[in-house]
């Protein structure tokens, strides 16, 4: 059964499994002790640190291991902000950072700090000049991911790092999604990553802090990991993480080219096979293994369940799930369609046959879900003389408001309007996205008289 969610967690690499088993026997002792077993454990830890530092592109004494990538991000942000508190309290982030960065920003703001979000374009990329302009006096730290975890768009880290250098602001890079494919270019100051993204075991992150960066670890500390990640190291997992990172890097060029070709096939074929689909993210500046697309008139949760029944494990940033009633912050910041969203991220070794079968199965699954939801499948009826209509979708969840809009847009003449009343948070994103996909004019929104929001669409064709 094909697993297509490597961006969430990659399958354990064979080298990681081998190293983990071996180090369970050799690396169980305390590496801080001077007796034989402790010295052996210290040698393993030092070797793992050197291997990881080489992959990151930093000195071994600049890198520490943490209990997770999220912990690395939180420790990096809090430590850098504390180390530069005399400079100011402004934290600059992109609008599409991983939730771990945004949560750290919320904590900083709650403590009285300032957070500035830099917007992105429709491909999910930050404008380097806009990022530079946000680095105003009083900025203590800036954060920019190397590549987006939901749509795969690669960010202009080198340009952002140069702007940060000119402004005297350290740059923290979340490299969780990209580190398996190569080092991060540019003069970054701090870098965080997570082993389970590249085929290492879960529960190991890494944080690199360049020499010269003002850094003050927060919370209780001890002598381990330079005081930046207190507690007894999970040495077997660390050894496995470093070994697998070295292994995936050795395979990265060949496997990346192979997976990029498979993803190109998905990007090209899905819009040809499935009507009313938007492929999102940059088509060129992107990770090699990841593609995301959104399907109009589809319940995202049902779509994922049906694909799972067909044997495909995929992810989604759709608002149509039981766990969240708001769209992905990434899709919202990009201004793209969120309903029926599917993220396909191929692990190493994915075969052409698996991708071909996915492309064969997807059209029928989408059509079936649309049919169950009563989505429009034929040309709209002839328009009535009325110049406007109101659709009451209050209490109805994504994608029903957009489906009801699509059903009635043909009932008004060209130039007429349809007002959709909705209290679903996704409608604020999906109705304008529908208008762009269908060539209609999105007029705007206003508070609804009976609650919710009134979204006005003018028929253009």
Image: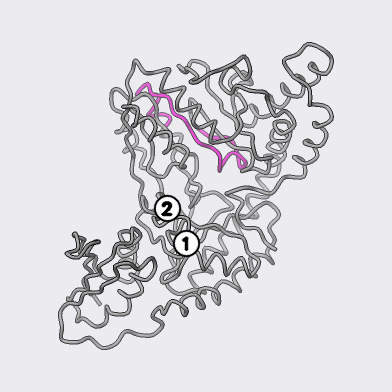
Disc 2 or 1, which lies upstream in sequence? 2
Whether label 2 touches label 1, CB < 8 Å: yes
Highlighted range, magenta: 161-185
Residue 407 to residue 96: above or below: below
The quadrant the N terminus occupies is bottom right
Residue 165 forms part of the magenta stretch: yes
Q: Which residue is disc 1 drawn over?
A: 341
Residue 255 is left or right of residue 68, and the answer is right
Question: What percent of the width, then of the height, locates residue 217?
Answer: 50, 19
Residue 124 forms part of the magenta stretch: no
Q: Could you say which disc has been placed on residue 177 in the image?
A: none
Q: Could you say which disc has been placed on residue 328 in the image?
A: 2
Asked which secondary structure carries label 2, the reply is loop
Question: What percent of the width, then of the height, locates residue 354?
Answer: 67, 65
Question: What percent of the width, then of the height, locates residue 323?
Answer: 47, 55
- Residue occupying the point 43% across, 37% down: 103
The image quarter containing residue 141 is top left
Q: Residues within 10 Å of mark 2 (few under 14, many from 20)?
A: some
- Residue occupying the point 71% across, 54% down: 349
Asked which secondary structure carries label 1, the reply is strand
In this view of the protein, which residue sits in the foreground, 449 or 249? 449
């Amino acid at each position: 059964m094909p697993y297509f969610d490597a961006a969430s967690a990659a399958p354990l690499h064979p080298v990681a499994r081998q190293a983990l088993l071996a180090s369970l026997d050799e690396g169980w002792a305390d590496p801080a002790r001077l007796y034989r077993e402790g010295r052996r454990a210290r040698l393993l830890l030092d070797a793992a640190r050197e291997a990881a530092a080489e992959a990151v592109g930093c000195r071994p004494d600049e890198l520490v291991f943490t209990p997770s990538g999220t912990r690395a991000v939180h420790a990096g942000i809090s430590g850098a902000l504390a180390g530069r508190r005399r400079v100011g309290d402004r934290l600059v982030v992109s609008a599409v950072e991983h939730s771990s960065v945004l949560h750290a920003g919320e904590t900083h703001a709650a403590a009285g700090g300032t957070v500035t979000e830099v917007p992105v374009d429709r491909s999910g990329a930050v404008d380097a000049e806009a990022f530079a302009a946000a680095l105003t006096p009083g900025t203590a730290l800036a954060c920019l991911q190397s590549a987006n975890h939901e749509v795969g768009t690669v960010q202009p880290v080198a340009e952002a790092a140069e702007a940060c250098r000119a402004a005297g602001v350290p740059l923290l890079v979340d490299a969780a999604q990209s580190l398996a494919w190569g080092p991060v270019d540019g003069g970054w100051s701090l870098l965080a990553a997570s082993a389970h993204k590249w085929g290492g075991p879960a529960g190991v992150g890494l944080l690199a802090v360049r020499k010269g960066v003002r850094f003050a670890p927060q919370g209780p500390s001890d002598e381990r990991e330079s005081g930046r990640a207190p507690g007894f190291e999970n040495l077997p997992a660390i050894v496995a993480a470093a070994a697998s990172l070295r292994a995936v890097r050795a395979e990265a060029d060949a496997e990346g080219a192979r997976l990029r070709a498979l993803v190109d096939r998905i990007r090209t074929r899905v819009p040809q096979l499935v009507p009313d689909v938007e492929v999102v993210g940059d088509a060129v500046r992107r990770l090699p293994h990841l593609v995301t697309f959104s399907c109009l008139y589809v319940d995202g949760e049902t779509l994922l369940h049906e694909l799972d029944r067909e044997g495909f494990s995929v992810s989604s940033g759709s608002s149509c799930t039981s766990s969240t009633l708001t769209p992905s912050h990434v899709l919202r910041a990009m201004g793209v369609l969120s309903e029926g969203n599917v993220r396909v991220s191929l692990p190493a070794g994915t075969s052409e046959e698996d991708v071909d079968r996915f492309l064969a199965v997807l059209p029928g699954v989408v059509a079936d879900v649309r049919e169950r939801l009563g989505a429009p499948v034929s040309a709209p009826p002839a328009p009535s003389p009325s110049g406007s209509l109101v659709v009451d979708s209050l209490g109805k969840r994504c994608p029903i408001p957009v489906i009801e809009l699509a059903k009635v847009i043909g009932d008004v003449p060209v130039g007429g309007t349809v007002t959709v009343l909705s209290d679903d948070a996704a409608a604020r994103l999906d109705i304008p996205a529908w208008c762009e996909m269908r060539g209609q004019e999105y007029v705007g929104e206003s508070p609804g008289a009976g609650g919710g929001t009134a979204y006005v669409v003018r028929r253009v064709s």
